[in-house]
Amino acid sequence: FNVHEFFWIVLTSVMLTLFFDTPFQNIKNYWIRKPTSPVKSPTAKSIKAE
């Protein structure tokens, strides 16, 4: 078991995840995000009913 090699593999994996995968997930979530519809407040209904 080579500890030095294991260290570099783990370090490289973490760096690649932080620098490439995470930003692209944020970009994907931004573009695929559903538009939010405005929510009516429950007090608006009660005012109209009166």
Image (cartoon, rainbow, N blue to C red):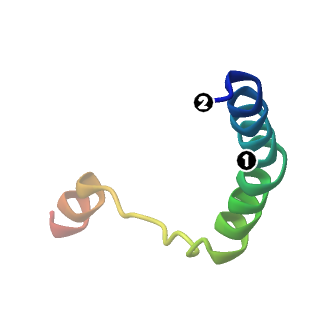
Marks 1 and 2, the one that precedes in the sequence: 2
Residue 19, above or below 50: above
Residue 2 circle label? none
Query: Circle 1 is placed at which residue position?
Result: 17
Density class for disc 1 (Cα within 10 Å; few <14, some 14-19, many ≥20) is: few
Dot 2 falls on a residue whose secondary structure is: loop
Q: Is residue 30 left or right of residue 8?
A: left
Which mark lies nearer to you, 1 or 2? 2
Q: Is residue 46 left or right of residue 40?
A: left
Nearer-the-camera pick, 18 or 8: 8
Residue 28 drawn at (x, y percent) = 70, 69
Residue at 77 percent across and 61 percent down: it is: 24
Residue at 71 percent across and 57 percent down: it is: 26
Query: Circle 2 is placed at which residue position?
Result: 1
Residue 15 drawn at (x, y percent) = 80, 38
Density class for disc 2 (Cα within 10 Å; few <14, some 14-19, many ≥20) is: few
Q: Is residue 36 left or right of residue 8?
A: left
Residue 21 drawn at (x, y percent) = 74, 56
Residue 2, above or below 37: above
Nearer-the-camera pick, 40 or 23: 23
The N terminus - image quarter = top right
Q: What's the CA distance linking mark 1 and mark 2? A: 24 Å
Residue 29 drawn at (x, y percent) = 64, 65
